[in-house]
Amino acid sequence: MAWIHLVIAGLLEVAWAIGLKQSEGFSKLVPSAFTLVTMAASFYLLASAMRSLPAGTAYAVWTGIGAVGTVLIGIFWLNEPVNAGRVLSLTLLVAGLIGLKVSSA
């Protein structure tokens, strides 16, 4: 159950990061409220996952999901640039996440 909480927490991290972008510095009410709610839920689920997962692994996976997901949404939804360096970096992040999952089993 901890890994499920952690994955959902990571997806919520993506949601609040995009919400933060859309809030334009907390100047828009709805995106700001969305950001705060998803942020709180993400932290709650991360804390729940950390009850039984190593803190370093849980935190790294949480931030990794958030980073990879946010970059991908930035590329595909926000028209951010895609280049070889970004693709290589994302590949390395995913490889690291897989490595952490396998080595903490």
Image (cartoon, helix red, strand yellow):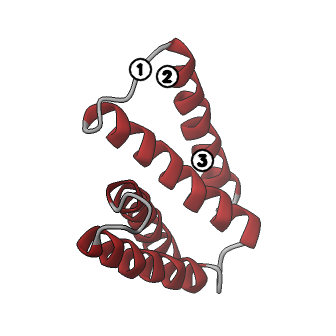
Q: Give the secondary structure at mark 1.
A: loop
Residue 21 spot, x, y in % from top left: 39, 54
| 74 sits left or right of 57 in the view | left
Q: Taking the image as drawn, is residue 72 in sight?
A: yes
Mark 3, residues whose alpha carbon is within 10 Å: few (<14), some, or many (≥20)? many
Type of amino acid at the residue the image marks with label 2: Val
Q: Which residue is mark 3?
A: 97
Q: Which residue is mark 2?
A: 87
Q: Which residue is mark 1?
A: 82
Q: Residue at x 49, y 54 (%)?
A: 66
Q: Give the secondary structure at mark 3.
A: helix
Q: CA distance from mark 3 to mark 2?
A: 15 Å
Q: Residue at x 38, y 75 (%)?
A: 38
Q: Quadrant of residue 80?
A: top left
Q: Nearer the viewer, residue 50 or 44?
A: 44
Type of amino acid at the residue the image marks with label 1: Val
Q: CA distance from mark 1 to mark 2?
A: 7 Å
